[in-house]
Image (cartoon, rainbow, N blue to C red):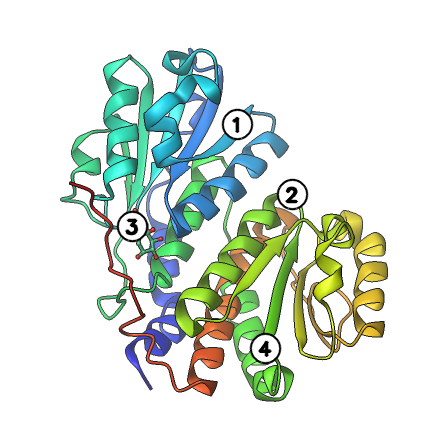
Amino acid sequence: MGRTEQSIFEQFPYWRTAITQAAPSPANAAPAAEIMVFVGCGTSYNLALSLAALANASGRAAIGVPGGEWTSDARRYWPRPEKAHVVALSRSGETTETVAAAKASRAIGARVTAITVERESVIAAHCDQLLVTKTHPVEGIVMTVSSSLMLLMGLRLLGYTVQESLIDTAQNLLDGLDARLPALIADRSHFVYLGGGALYGVALEGALKLMEMSQIFTQGFHPLEYRHGPISLVDDRTVAVMLYSPERKGAEAKLVAELQEKGARVIGLGGPGDAAFDVPCDPALIGLACLPALQLLGERAAQAHNIDTVAPRHLTKVVTLA
Ligand code: F1P
């Protein structure tokens, strides 16, 4: 087993530790904030999008913004950035754009919460509130355990309770998908990830994982957006991963049936597909429950192409700009 695969399968003890840590003081502890702005880059940006949707769902105005965008012109995203509560996500705590976003936000008086797995990082030194937990030491360039852990910490910041039973759900999904994966992805070269609301960021993250691990071009979409153009790519080379939202399952299942008619093989997470998996948990936690399985999909696709995910092409663990 390679190091990336090992980190995926061995992530749950780290979840357990993060779950049992003292709960962070709630996000609404920043009374002057008009809005929560979740910032990050790459995987951390995908998590930011998901957390922003979950914050809105729990009654707090929120947006997700790439670190570089918030740094270069925050006012294009929120007219009073000094009134924002900025939540900066960064595994390394060193990514140039995210660190700059945190520093610039503090400089104008905004509150900054940092979510990271590196206690001694730059971002940890430039925040008002630090959420940190330990990650698996074997994790390499491709972010696996740490992305699950940062999503978990973000959920707790928003006041969601992550029960130990979620670990069973995530583990069962990981093992269940793994048993079916070789047959599901055999001979398939076009992959698409679909998810709405908080699952849109998770769909993007599934796509990013597959792309960086296996070098297969892929995309993520809001489910019903897929009919508006991208569906023209679907044929018998397609695998579609549908992250079902419980409240929209009917409409999403109809889309899945259309994709199947056109030749796609569908992995249904929380609803129908050629391989269908239950995701029994609080709807807000579906994305977290699915992340390890999505990470594994990237790893198995890479293995099918004899690509080593320990050293993915053109990638480094941290992107720092001069
Ligand atoms: C952000 C990130 C990762 C990506 C790659 C480069 O890192 O874009 O998402 O996988 O390793 O950096 P971070 O700010 O979360 O450390």
Identify residue for label 4: 189
Tell which tag, 4 or 1, sits nearer the viewer: 4
The amino acid type of the residue labelled 3 equals Arg
The amino acid type of the residue labelled 2 equals Gly
**First-in-chain label (4 vs 3):** 3
Identify residue for label 1: 62
Q: Residues within 10 Å of mark 1 (few under 14, many from 20)?
A: many
Whether residue 264 is visible = yes
Q: Nearer the viewer, residue 13 or 180?
A: 180
- Position of residue 97 relative to residue 221, above or below, is above
Whether residues under marks 2 and 1 lie with C-beta atoms below 8 angstroms apart, the answer is: no
Whether residue 30 is visible = no
The amino acid type of the residue labelled 1 equals Ala
Looking at the image, residue 95 sits to the left or right of residue 27; the answer is left
Could you say where residue 79 lies in the image, as x and y percent from the top left? 47, 12
Q: Quadrant of the N terminus?
A: bottom left
- Position of residue 153 relative to residue 296, above or below, is above
Could you say where residue 5 lies in the image, as x and y percent from the top left? 37, 77
Which disc is residue 197 wearing?
Answer: 2
User: Could you say whether the residue bearing mark 1 is in a helix, strand or loop?
Assistant: strand
